[in-house]
Amino acid sequence: MEPRQKESAPMKKEQFVENEKKEARENFGALLDLVFKRYETPDSTIANSPEQIKTFKAHVEEVLNLCVERGIEKSLATKELKTLEVVAILHDLTKADRPDSDMKDIPNYMLAAHGELGAQETIRILGEHPKVLEKILNTGYSPQEADKTTKLISSAIRAHMGPHPGFMTFVLGGVNAKLKEKSLPELQHPRPLEGEAISETLLAADMRSLAGRKGREKVLAIRSAVPNFKREDEELCAEYKKHGINLVSGEAALLSAFASAEQARDMLRNEDDRLWIDTAIEASKEENYFYEDQSVNYAATTAKKEKFEKASKDGRDN
């Protein structure tokens, strides 16, 4: 009788997650390259900003990793997990595109519209790259399966936009007001359908990325590069100065970044997802951040905010 072979030990969860991250890049590397090249094309709004290109790419990579981690944590089936990986790669596909000529005069149009535009563009891309669906559905998939999966991916990309409370609601309102003036259809930021695991997990991962350090760096990079945001931060610094408080532009941008993270957390229905976001927010408060040539941090910035709020309240009371 031959000796019994030793059974292999079950794979540790951490190793399984790392293997899946590696497999996602092997399966969908061409799709990832397509998104990254789109950010770098001369037609991109960030083509001349290496820092923004870097942060946009890092965000996509991070959301992909977070989707894998969260998808496995939620015990998604293999096809669901691979669909989620494609959704993560494509979710910000059109965010750096230039708006059509009719929309060029609408501030923040692409910021508000990129979910809808990305959802539409995704249908074309998946049609032109059938191997993507093959990696999800295996060979010999039916037209019905392809249509169902394509619609699911498109819907999840559309739903990752909201409804965002606070800042994005303000942006959407301004964009829709301009669209109405032009007699054009207004944009909608739909919430993921309750129980739709892929849409909900993408939204949670996207918000988790915004709540962590890389998300904070991305917000600071955008606010330093976009004139409207830069002006808003300078105006806030001027308000602080009226009370003798020297808030610098980087600190004003950091306040906006943390407010965005908290609003991101509040979008989520699932309590476990909300706690996941809270963990990232708390960890990111210990970091130092850079805005152009300024080094800023949470503790000093919030101390100035508290002083400003007290001074403003005292002024109203008097």
Image (tube, grey):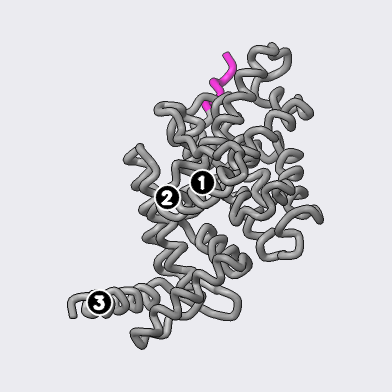
Q: Secondary structure at mark 2?
A: helix
Q: Decide which of 168, 34 is in the foreground and name it.
A: 168
Span of residues in magenta: 1-7
The kind of residue on which mark 2 rests is Ala
Taking the spot 34% from the left edge, 41% from the top edge, the residue there is 272
Seen in the image, is 169 located left or right of residue 217? left
Query: Quick one: which residue is furthest to the right in this view?
Result: 42
> Marks 1 and 3: in contact by CB < 8 Å?
no
Q: Is 176 inside the magenta-drawn segment?
A: no
Please tell me the numbered disc located at residue 264: 2
Q: Decide which of 99, 130 is in the foreground and name it.
A: 99
User: First in sequence: mark 2 or mark 1?
Assistant: 1
Q: How many marks can you see? A: 3
Please tell me the numbered disc located at residue 206: 1
Taking the spot 42% from the left edge, 62% from the top edge, the residue there is 258
Task: Quote the CA–CA distance across marks 3 and 2.
Answer: 26 Å
Taking the spot 45% from the left edge, 64% from the top edge, the residue there is 256
Task: Quote the CA–CA distance across marks 3 and 1.
Answer: 34 Å
User: First in sequence: mark 3 or mark 1?
Assistant: 1
Percent position (x, y) of residue 298? 40, 71
- Quadrant of the frame with the C terminus: bottom left
Q: Which residue is mark 3?
A: 310
Percent position (x, y) of residue 237? 45, 78
Task: Quote the CA–CA distance across marks 2 and 1.
Answer: 9 Å
Q: Is 5 inside the magenta-drawn segment?
A: yes
Query: Quick one: which residue is furthest to the left in this view?
Result: 317
